[in-house]
């Protein structure tokens, strides 16, 4: 049984089809990059999987329809890192990360030693130990992003959805996060991650889903589907590519900009 199965999924908004008849499945241990231009439907697809939006078709998590699950049960299977990562709660950083364990707690129980261990592992992985006692809303944007990623990591779910998780992070923390996701996949957990950085998608993801105009146009390993013509069709750019000891390197080098008219 697939961890996630999406079948004939469609989502409309204001009479416009944003996600159009998409089907795919994700098994254990996959790091799936969801890529495509702005407005392609990537974020809407993730929110439909989370049952945050009404949809047509089917989305099953461990064989159970996502929209029919209770929120707490869905949170035990699926964690989510949203695009908006500004923290407005008046809480210490450590307390925010601890929220990731709520779906596993019985009523009126506190964190167990195992819960706290998972929280500590997430804090250490995102390198925010020195921030643990600071009010989360006083942090920089990049620091707040790392806190919320740590919260999702502490949730300990078999499947994680991440919407542009590297946005706002410096290059070192972008690479660190990609390594964390890859390590999670190698341990048997699965990640679906929207990315605009083709270099990161090519280097770290085990599989890519390419989305354009709400439809799924390609599905496969990065080296198999990231051909020059596919990238040019998706983004209107030419790229430099190289096979290295560290994997496939792809770097956009030229865009097909429209010419400006003289004014």
Image (spheres, rainbow, N blue to C red):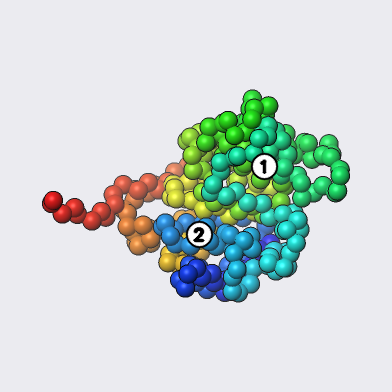
Per the image, label 2 sits on a secondary structure element best described as helix
Circle 1 sits in a helix, a strand or a loop, which is it? helix
Reply above or below: 92 against 178. Answer: above
Tell me the number on the disc at residue 182: none
Depth check: give the residue in front, 194 or 202: 194
Q: Quadrant of residue 110?
A: top right
Residue at 58%, 36% (x, y): give it: 144
Badges 2 and 1: C-beta atoms under 8 Å apart?
no
Quadrant in the rendering for residue 62? bottom right
Q: Name the residue located 73 percent from the left edge and 58 percent from the top edge.
A: 71
Q: Residues within 10 Å of mark 2 (few under 14, many from 20)?
A: many
In-front residue for pair 173/218? 173
Quadrant placement of the N terminus: bottom right
2 or 1: tag closer to the N-terminus: 2
- Residue that mark 1 sits on: 151
Residue 174 seen in render:
yes
Q: Residue at x 76, y 58 (%)?
A: 73
Q: CA distance from mark 2 to mark 1?
A: 22 Å
Horizontally, residue 259 falls left or right of residue 214, namely: left
Location of mark 2 (residue): 42
Instruction: Give coordinates of residue 196: x percent, y percent.
Output: 44, 50
Residue placed most toward the observer, 153 or 92:
92
Q: Quadrant of residue 192?
A: bottom right
In the image, is residue 12 above or below residue 208? below
Is residue 251 left or right of 117 when viewed as pictured? Answer: left
Q: What residue lies at 67% left-to-right and 29% top-to-bottom?
A: 132
The percent position of residue 2, horizontal first and vertical second, equals: 68, 65
Q: Position of residue 156 (x, y in %)?
A: 72, 47
């Amino acid at each position: 049984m697939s961890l996630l199965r999406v079948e004939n999924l469609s989502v409309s908004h204001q009479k416009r089809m944003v996600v159009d008849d998409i089907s795919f499945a994700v098994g254990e241990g996959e790091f799936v990059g969801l890529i495509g231009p702005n407005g392609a439907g990537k974020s809407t697809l993730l929110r439909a999987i989370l049952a945050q939006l009404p949809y047509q078709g089917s989305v099953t998590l461990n064989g159970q329809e996502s929209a029919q699950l209770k929120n707490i049960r869905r949170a035990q299977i699926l964690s989510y890192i949203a695009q908006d990562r500004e923290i407005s709660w008046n809480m210490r950083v450590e307390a925010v990360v601890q929220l990731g364990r709520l779906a596993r707690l019985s009523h009126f129980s506190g964190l167990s030693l195992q819960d706290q261990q998972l929280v500590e592992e997430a804090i250490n992985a995102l390198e925010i130990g020195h921030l643990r006692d600071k009010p989360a809303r006083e942090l920089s944007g990049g620091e707040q992003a790392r806190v919320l990623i740590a919260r999702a990591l502490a949730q300990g779910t078999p499947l994680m959805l991440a919407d542009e998780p590297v946005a706002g992070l410096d290059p070192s923390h972008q690479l660190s996060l990609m390594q964390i996701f890859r390590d999670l996949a190698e341990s048997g957990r699965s990640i679906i991650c929207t990315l605009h950085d083709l270099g990161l998608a090519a280097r770290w993801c085990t599989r890519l889903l390419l989305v354009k105009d709400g439809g799924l146009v390609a599905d496969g390993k990065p080296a198999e589907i990231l051909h020059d013509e596919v990238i040019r069709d998706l983004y209107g750019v030419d790229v430099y590519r190289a096979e290295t000891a560290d994997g496939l390197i792809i770097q956009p080098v030229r865009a097909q900009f429209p010419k400006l008219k003289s004014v």
